[in-house]
Image (tube, rainbow, N blue to C red):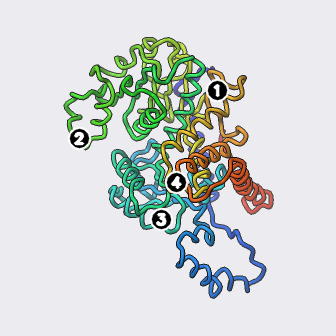
Amino acid sequence: MEKITREELIRRSKIPGVNALKMHLFYQGKMQVMPKCQIRSFEDFGIWYSPGVAAPCREIHKNKEKVYDFTSKWNHVAVVSDGSRVLGLGNIGPEASLPVMEGKALLFKYLGGVDAFPLSIGYGDCCTAEQIIDFVKMIQPTFGGVNLEDISSPKCFKVLDTLRSDPELNIPVWHDDQQGTACVTLAALINSLKIVGKKKKEIKIVFNGVGASNFAIARLLKEDGFDLKKALFVDSKGILYKGRSDLTNLENYKHGIAKVSNPEEIRGDCGVALEGADVLISLSVPGPGVIKKEWISHMAEDPIVFACANPVPEIFPWDAKEAGARIVATGRSDFPNQVNNSLGFPGIFRGTLDVRAKTITDEMCIAAAHALANIVSEIPECLTEDCIIPTMEYEDLFVKEAVAVGLTAIRQGIARLKFSEEELKKKARTIIDLAQGQYKALLKAGFIPEFTDYVS
């Protein structure tokens, strides 16, 4: 692996931002609304609008479920954020979060064929959990699903858990910072364990950082059969344990983590936690130097290190390798093994929408993770220490995820529509191909102008 100085890595990390400023000004946004129906003449507006539109309105009034048949609700997803924790920028507010939400909508459309709408909400300050919950419930007539994005913790936990359990909400709600990151991390860990020959019920995992991402990762790993009693969680104050004075508040989500982990009540910093550990999953603060080489050297044989802070990982991959790490993953695309939630949500929502599932369960996320892992592991020459997870270029990645998610929803009895595996595959492939084909046609025809003034 090429060694890069911290200065060069930071320089490279700034290049996308420089190009982003130029290109966002050039295009003035990333998404637009286009008709999907034929307009033969101006007389057709009498069909699509008044007076003809009253006919489908009456049908929906008689049976609300027909809204999926007569409108685009079946493929509409709201990307909702109050801007309270945007990327690594923190609480920058709803207006400043909008470019991120538009970017999310772009990935939804191009990779999953999903029509996603960025909805940054609030009046300058971040919203309360109750306000976000009420907003989502109010917009559900228009959307087939909701993607919560960049909402601070612990507020994000209350929002997601409340909405998922609300009997009045009949559409799936997903928090990508929690569930998406967890899904992709699980996929990467499944393949890593295959390479090192270890079993998920026997390994010791250290979670460095106890925010929304690691909280959700731990929950999904537990659902997939990992033993969290062997796990240690580390925040800025050290290892979590039951008797820690700042964790006595029962409403503190870390209190719950401390109860199910670290039965020996080990105390100390991340270095202490990593002694004899098999896996490190770190989503904390940018490095390098946050994770020290000597800590890695004290891990178990063939350790697995996921250092996923952005823009600079907690430890450089080559430093982790020199310290003894067998497998290293980061959040960066210019290093091997990028763990990025963009590998998950487009396919997961495609499968969820295609069967009109009422929610997105942990089982559906686990099914997507295993489908993602299998893409690499089914090709023996591809499953290596530097290829534990596919990139976006892998053929049918999002289709395979969609099929796995849809079939799981059907088995769980939460799907409104039922299809065979082959039918789901054809449906997802057709919709994704249409989205990408439409884009390419617009670009070729010049309706989307090309940008050429790139900085490299």
Tell which tag, 2 or 4, sits nearer the viewer: 4
x, y percentage for residue 91? 38, 49
Marker disc for residue 414: 4
Q: Of helix, strand and loop, which one carries label 1?
A: loop
Tell which tag, 4 or 3, sits nearer the viewer: 4
Residue annotated with mark 3: 140
Crowding at mark 2 (Cα within 10 Å: few <14, some 14-19, many 20+): few
- Per the model, the C-alpha gap separating discs 1 and 4 is 34 Å
Q: Please give the name of the residue rendered at 58% of the width and 43% of the height, measured from the top-left corner.
A: 344
Which of marks 3 and 4 precedes in the sequence? 3
Circle 2: residue type? Leu
- Per the model, the C-alpha gap separating discs 2 and 4 is 32 Å
Front residue of this view, candidates 300 and 125: 300
Residue annotated with mark 2: 250
Q: Is residue 386 left or right of residue 215?
A: right
Q: Of helix, strand and loop, which one carries label 3?
A: loop
Circle 3: residue type? Gln
x, y percentage for residue 104? 56, 51
Crowding at mark 4 (Cα within 10 Å: few <14, some 14-19, many 20+): some
Image height check: is 65 above or below 357? below
- Per the model, the C-alpha gap separating discs 3 and 2 is 32 Å
